[in-house]
Image (cartoon, rainbow, N blue to C red):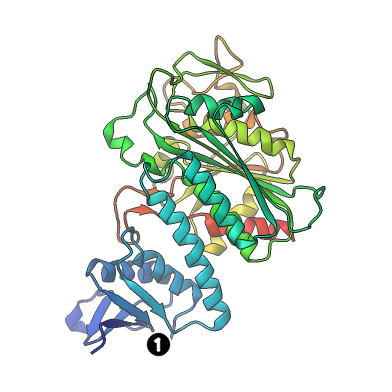
Amino acid sequence: MSDTLKVILSHQPAAPQWGDNALVSFDTDKAVIHASNDANQRDKVQQAARKLEGQGVPALTLTGEHWDLELVWAFYQGLRGPKNKVAFTQTVLNEDDTQEFELRQTVGDWVRDIINQTAEEVGPHQLVARAGEFVKSMAPDQVTYKIISGTDLLEKGWNGIYTVGRGSARKPTMLQLDYNPTGDPDAPVYACLVGKGITFDSGGYSIKGSDFMTTMKADMGGSATATGALAMAIAKGLNKRVKLVLCCAENMISSSAYKLGDIITYKNGVTVEVLNTDAEGRLVLADGLMYASEQKPELLIDCATLTGSAKAALGNDYHALFSFDDELAHRTLDAAQKEGEGMWPLPLAEFHRQLLPSSFADIANASMGAYMPGASTAAAFLSYFVEDYQKGWMHVDCSGTYRKAANDKWAVGATGMGVKTLARVLLDQAK
């Protein structure tokens, strides 16, 4: 008898002996998922995959009727955990859908794996080098990149990344990647993606408690998401020039680490007083947004696991979306709905830009006081480094990137949420 479990999808309820609400029933070498064809079907399929993974099934294959691409993908999302023990195959998709599914696997697995790996394995240089090579693998002749690290950042004027990362023995690093399918070195840049890549966040001198620090290997999730989105869009035929900028550092404590009260002078002349060294993501993203603005793109998207405020508002099931450009926000929300991923708008208005006062600099890196809208003021901070912040720019606070605990749909760890949505935005906007 084969050790591969066949998994069948049924629209009918389970037999009475399995219980009124049974999601999965079994028959020798076969498991049957009972999920009626309704709005909750994807969730039920993903939950069923979690149940099978939790039982230690060594190998399974999807077979039978009723499967489609989105249901197979939902099953795989639930099945895949950080230890990757279950051998998975499917015989239910046609050739085109199988190709799409395998692309999602390739990109999604890369994103989830690099986020799940330890900070010891993925430092700033490792992150940018691996991201650069992964995107390049999608179009070897159309992708070039350079890595700037250590004091070279200061020579180029990228003071935020350098300041945040100078307390670590691992050098802070910036990736500047250029995907140019036109072959014309003077072709306009259609879009820029900017990712926060804090490969470990101790909080610096505003040190985190252990309960909050245990997941901080995942504080580079914005960089992983942006990288995955571009890689997927390239594989699907993106035909316009796009640049990827990753702003990477370890936020550590040492005699050379930056301190509260320090003032950073940015390349655009804006001065920032550091009131909280645990509000470091916005300090590194500022450099990336300025570099991106220099490229004069039509579309600028930054991705970051930026604030606890966004996660407090939305939990792990949605990324928070901020933009002054309502049309762009609506298109992104529509893309998220079509891709079956969680994205939700939070407010960003002109008055939020005034909630970062400093007595010694132009602005502070944190909004102080009770009941401050921390996610909105973080987005407002970033706007100071976007040349035209009212049009074509959006900020994604990646609340759903990483789960500290498993639930009935997701294993513990990285989710890959948002990659498909942002890839669709790039492709749809480029038409």
Q: Residue at x 73, y 54 (%)?
A: 180
Q: Quadrant of the C terminus?
A: bottom right
Q: Quadrant of the N terminus?
A: bottom left
Decide: is 165 above or below 32.
Answer: above
Q: Is residue 416 visible?
A: no
Q: Residue 325 placed where, x, y %?
A: 68, 42
- Considering every residue shown, the one lying at the far top of the view is 359
Pick the residue in front: 245 or 365. 245
User: What is the number of callouts on the image?
Assistant: 1
Q: Residue at x 36, y 31 (%)?
A: 202
Q: Residue 329 placed where, x, y %?
A: 63, 48
Decide: is 412 above or below 42.
Answer: above
Pick the residue in front: 401 or 187. 187
The answer to whether residue 370 is left or right of residue 54 is right
Pick the residue in front: 71 or 225. 225
Decide: is 201 above or below 112.
Answer: above
User: Which amino acid type is marked by label 1?
Assistant: Gly
Q: Residue 185 placed where, x, y %?
A: 80, 49
Quarter location, residue 215: top left
The answer to whether residue 86 is left or right of residue 246 is left
Quarter location, residue 292: top right
Q: Secondary structure at mark 1?
A: loop
Q: Residue 333 placed where, x, y %?
A: 58, 54
The answer to whether residue 324 is left or right of residue 208 is right
Q: Which residue is mark 1?
A: 64
Q: Residue at x 24, y 66 (%)?
A: 54
Q: Residue at x 30, y 39 (%)?
A: 214
